Image (tube, rainbow, N blue to C red):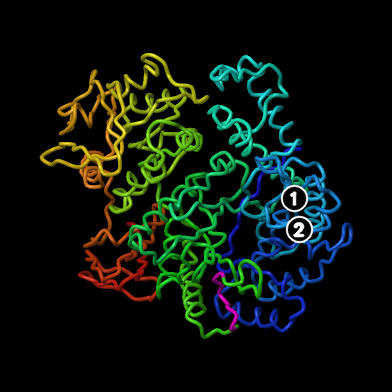
Amino acid sequence: MTVPKAHLKLPYLLHGGDYNPDQWQAYPQIIDQDFTMMPQAGVNTVTVGVFSWAALEPEEGHYDFGWLDQVFDRVEAMNGRVILATPSGARPHWLADRYPEVLRTDEYGRQALFGGRHNHCFTAPSYREQTQQINRKLAERYGQRPSLLLWHISNEFGGECHCDLCQAAFRQWVQKKYQTLAAVNEAWWTPFWGHTLTAWDQIHSPSPIGDTNLKGLNLDWRRFVTDQTIDFYENEIQPLRELTPEIPITTNFMTDTPAMMPFHGLDYQKFATHLDVISWDSYPAWGNDQESTADLGLKVAMINDYYRSLKQQDFLIMESSPSLVNWHPFNRPKRPGVNRLAGLQNIASGSDSMLYFQWRQSRGASEMFHGAVVDHHGSTATRTFQEVSQLGADLKQLAPVRQLPHVPARVALVFDYDNMCALADSEAYADTTKQYWQTLQQHYAYFWRHDIPIDVISPQADLAPYQLVLDPMHFLMDQAWIDKVADFTQAGGTVVGTYLSGVVDERTLAYLGDQPQRLHELYGVQTTEVDTLYPHQHNGVHYGDQTYPAQDYCEVITNQTASVLATYTADFYAGQPAITKNQYGAGTAYYLAARTDAACLTALYHQLATELDLHPTYPLAKASSDISIQVRGDQNQRYLFVMNFGETANTINLTQPLTEVLSNRTYPAGAQELAPYQVLVFHELIK
C-alpha cells in the first residue's frame, strides 16, 4: 500500500535545536538545569536522538529508552515539541565489530576502522536491517506521543563507499541505465586511450589508482551515489511510513562553505522529491574579513531561496550556531545583533524555524567548543543566551507568519547539479575560475539587492510561473532542457544565457557540428572559440555608453539573427559581439559571451527588470542596498522584513504609517534610521 506523505502542522515558529541529554546521564543536575533554562530562552522545540544509537541500544537487542522517555515527558510538560532523529549517522561499536561489512571502503580500496560519523556502507544489507530495526522500535514507542512533530532521518547524509557490495550495485545501476556495453562505451567514450569495456565486471568506480579520466564514468558515479543514498534513506523510513504515516519526514541538507553553495556530494534536487519537508544546516562565516555582512547576507539569501524552491514550500533551519562554529579556518563569534539579523532573515526567506546546534556545549570530543545556547559556564547571563532569548521572543511575536508563504517569484535562476559536476570535472578552461555557483550568485545579486523575489530552480522545474529565466554557464545541457527553455521563450518569456553553455550533452559528450541547433536558434549566435584569460588579464565590453571589464572567459561568437548590444574592446576579437539580444517567437533571448563585472550585470538587469515591471512596490523606500526588504504574505496581508546588513546606520523612508510587530508600535510616515544589523518587521493589511 502506498502511504500518502504527511504534512508538517506547525503549532508556532520553531525555536530550539539539537539536544543531547544522552551525553549527560551521569549529571542529572545538568538535565534539570536544561529544562529550567529552555523556557527562559523561548525554546519550544528540541531535536533529540542524533548520534544516540549507542545510548538507545548499548548491546545488540538490548534497549534503553528510559532517558528518552524522560525527555519526551519533560518537553510535553513545557508544552514543547520533539523532532526525533533516527540514529544511523553514527552506529555503535558493537555493530561495526559484529558486521564489519558496514565499514566504508575508500577510493583506494582501504576499509575504514570504526570511528567518525556517516562512515557506513549504504549498500550493506546488515546495516539496512539494523537501521530498520532500531527505527521500528522508535516508531512503536514514540510514534503516538503528542509532542512528536517530525522525523529527522540520520544527519547530514554524505560520503561514498567503494567496497565490493557498492561496486556490484554500481554495475547493476549502469546496466539498468544503458542496457548494453556498447551504449556504455559510447557514453563514456572508452575507445580513447583504449579503455573499451568488454565485460560488465570491468566497471569500477572512479579511483586514483584506476580510472578518473572518463568524464561519463565520473558523472555516472556521482549520480549513482545520490541514487544509492536515497535508496538507503527509503529503506530507513519504511517502518516510519508504516507505523506513523501522519508524521512528516525530513533529513538535514548541507552547504559547502565559505561559498555558501549546495553540498557537492549529493543531488539535493533529486533527493528533495523524497522528503515531506526541506531542512538545512546554516553556518555562514559571519564577521569574516573577506566580505561585508551585506555580501554574505546575499549568499545566505540565495541558498535559502534554493532550498525553498526545491519543493516550492516553506522550509526549516535545522541547525545554526548562535555564536561560532569550531570547524571554519577561523572561528569567530557573531557580532552583537547578528544572531537576530540572521534568524529573522531566515524567517523572511521562508523558514518556519530557527534551530541551533547545539543547546548545550559538549564537555569533550570534537565539538566541545562549537557554539551553543548554553556554554560551559552554564549561565543565562552570557551575551549568546540573552540574544537567543530575544530572538525567541521575536519569533513568538511573529507566530502568524508561519501561515504565510514567501511571496511568489517571477524570476528564476537555473542551477543544475549534473552541470556543476560536469563543469568542475571538465578540462580546458581554468582550474580556479570556472566557479559555477559563484557565477550564479553574481547574477542573483541584482535581484536580491533590489528586493525582487527570485527562485533557484532545477531544469526539471515548471517555467510557467516565471517571466524571466537566468541560465548562466549551463555547460552540460540536454535536449529536453533546450526544448523547454526555447518553448518558454517562444511563448513570450525572457531568458538570459551565457558563455560555456550547451557544450556537452547529458553523457558529457561534446555536441558536434551545429548541434544543439535549437539552442543556436534561440540565442541567434554561434560560439566559435573560447578565450580563457589568466587572472591578471582583462578585456573590455562596451555596453550602452560605458565600457566594463571582462575577465576569465570571453567567447568569440558569430552573430546569426541577434541584435548586438555590446562589443569587445580589445584583442583579436575587438569589435565583435559580447552581448546580444534575439527575438524568438513572442519572447526574447539575451546572450552574454563574456564574464563581466557586477556593474555591467546591474545595467543589463536593471533594464530587463524595468521593461518587465519586476520591481516591487512597498510603502517604504530604502537609501542603501545594504538594506534588504523581504516579504511573507498573501492577498490580504503581508509582513515586510526590513533588515540592515550594513556595518553602519542606514535610512528608510515610510510613505505611510506602519505597525512594527516586534516593538508593537506604529511608525509615522517619514525617515527612519536603522542601526547596524537592526531589523524592523512591518505588518500591512492589503485593501
Vertical relation: 182 (above or below) 535: above
Question: Horizontal and vertical percent for residue 571?
Answer: 18, 31
For the view shown, which residue lies furthest in the right direction?
61
Vertical relation: 63 (above or below) 617: below
Residue at left offset 29%, top offset 21%: 528
Q: Which residues are magenta?
A: 370-377
Question: Horizontal and vertical percent for residue 283?
Answer: 49, 60
Q: Is residue 649 magenta?
A: no
Residue at left offset 74%, top offset 50%: 240
The residue lying toward the viewer, choosing from 61 and 670, is: 61
Contact, mark 2 vs mark 1 (Cβ under 8 Å): yes
Helix, strand, or loop for circle 1? helix
Amino acid at pointer 2: Gly
Residue identifier under label 2: 143
Helix, strand, or loop for circle 2? loop
Residue 240: give its label. Answer: 1
